[in-house]
Amino acid sequence: MRVYRLDPVQSARNNMVRSQLKPNGVVNRTILNIFNEISRENFVPVSLYAMAYGDATIFCGVPGRYIFAPQTLGLFLQNLNLVPNDKVLLIGGNYGYTATVLTELECQVFVIESQPTLLSKCREKLKKYNTVIESGPLKLGLAEHGPYQAIIIEVGLKEVPNEIVNQLADGGRVALCIVNDVDQLSRAHVFEKKMESLDQVISFEANMPLCLELDESIKFRF
């Protein structure tokens, strides 16, 4: 009798989709399929491979820098209403997982990364894609390639810098995690830009520690 052995890594991906994404409202089949196909373990520090498919943020080895938990990224992508060829700016490339998912969604992806080690990792992971990855301060974004239909900020912050909001097209959406000053707890938000204001689309609990890199500029207050 032939015995079929289930690939444990593929099993972990299946379980991530089944137990983290779907129960928390991620129903877009394209997004679910991409999460089920990309080897997430290749986008985390080697010492944290065992956490690749867990439901928590993953530390990137640089102070203040973490990879989104799967359900956080899944809900962000679903509520950004992305379509092929949308221009998307990613603030913080980290290990390249979010950028890779965006390229698989057929978006035009632009990444700004300030940390040399993370910049190198991101470029390595995305070398087969036509993705623009540039070095520079996160708080400045990449205005020269805007405006963008969507902006994702993969760091925890208190408010959104004006410089970044200004790079969003009218009707575009921004996804980020805002950390509360009082208790340091964070919530994930998606906002839609309408003229000179940002209207909230969705808000939900998410664990993303504060990153001080974006905390020194003038901010947009919601």
Image: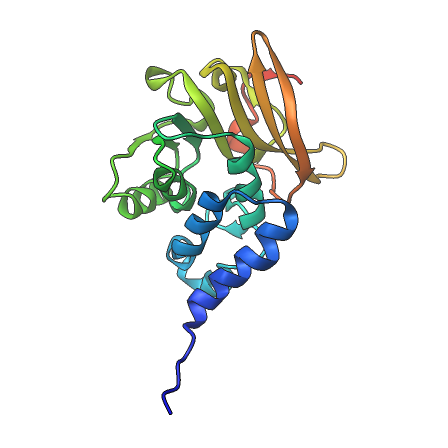
- Residue 66: give x, y in percent of width and height: 51, 45
Residue 90: quadrant of the picture:
top left
- Residue 155: give x, y in percent of width and height: 53, 37
Depth order, front residue of 84/40: 84
Q: Is residue 56 visible?
A: no
Q: Residue at the location (23% across, 44% down)?
A: 128
The C terminus: image quadrant = top right
Depth order, front residue of 126/22: 22
Residue 88: quadrant of the picture:
top left
Instruction: Answer left or right for 41 relative to 214.
Output: left
- Residue 1: give x, y in percent of width and height: 38, 92
Q: Is residue 58 visible?
A: yes
Asked if 216 appears above or below 70 in the picture, the reply is above
- Farthest residue, direction top: 195
Q: How is the image coloured?
A: rainbow
Image mark count = 0
- Farthest residue, direction right: 182
Asked if 33 appears above or below 164 in the picture, the reply is below
Instruction: Answer left or right for 1 relative to 201.
Output: left
Depth order, front residue of 92/215: 92
- Farthest residue, direction front: 1
Depth order, front residue of 131/20: 20
- Residue 159: give x, y in percent of width and height: 61, 24
Asked if 67 appears above or below 20 in the picture, the reply is above
Instruction: Answer left or right for 84 relative to 12.
Output: left
Residue 82: quadrant of the picture:
top left
